[in-house]
Image (cartoon, grey):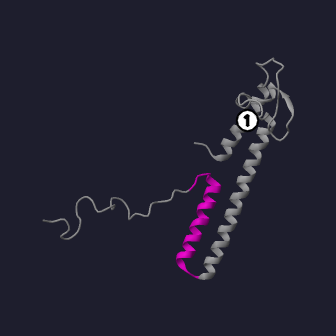
Amino acid sequence: LKCKQCVAADEQTERENAAKRKGDDDNSNETRKCAGKCAKVLPKASFNRNQYSKGEGKSRCRDCVEQSVKDESANQQKSKEEKITAARKKVDDAKRSGKAHLILAAESELAALEAEKVTGLKPIKLSAGRGRGRGSGGGRGRGRGVGRS
């Protein structure tokens, strides 16, 4: 089990190693237009095997894929920060209202978001049941006189 930073570092290392290996086993002169932001006509060595196999008009070069990964990561980070800011505002509003159940709900939401930011794990929402084994009234001990003949 690895933390988010370790996983991201391993992915970056793997991408760098793949970029170093690019073209080692390929000596063809095929070219293809990148479907990413650069839209350049590039040799086959500029694409990884997965992207190149997608075909003309769909494959993105290594640089465009790398930039896309960075952009997506930045967008996710920004979105998480915005959610935490909104949750902090919700806590402040709940504290101003003075209602304990609103304060508890807002603080719980904020704690879950901050924990997700640190650990990378999303919280598990528990069911609204009354605990273990108290479902639809089945089993032994149904109460007084219920089900007796």
| Left or right of 25 on screen, residue 104 | left
Q: Secondary structure at mark 1?
A: helix
Q: Is residue 21 above or below residue 104?
A: above
Give the residues drawn in magenta, as a range: 98-122
Q: Is residue 35 above or below residue 122?
A: above
Residue closer to the observer: 133 or 43: 43
Residue closer to the observer: 85 or 142: 142
The residue at 15%/66% (across/down) is 148
Q: What amino acid is labelled 1 in the image? A: Thr
The residue at 79%/34% (across/down) is 61
Q: For the C terminus, give its image quadrant.
A: bottom left
Q: Tell me the quarter of the picture where residue 29 sits.
A: top right
Q: Which residue is labeled 1 in the image?
A: 13
User: What x and y, as percent, mark residue 103?
Assistant: 57, 75
- Answer few, some or many: residues within 10 Å of disc 1's Cα (few below 14, many 20 plus, some between 14 and 19): few
Q: Is residue 129 above or below residue 51?
A: below
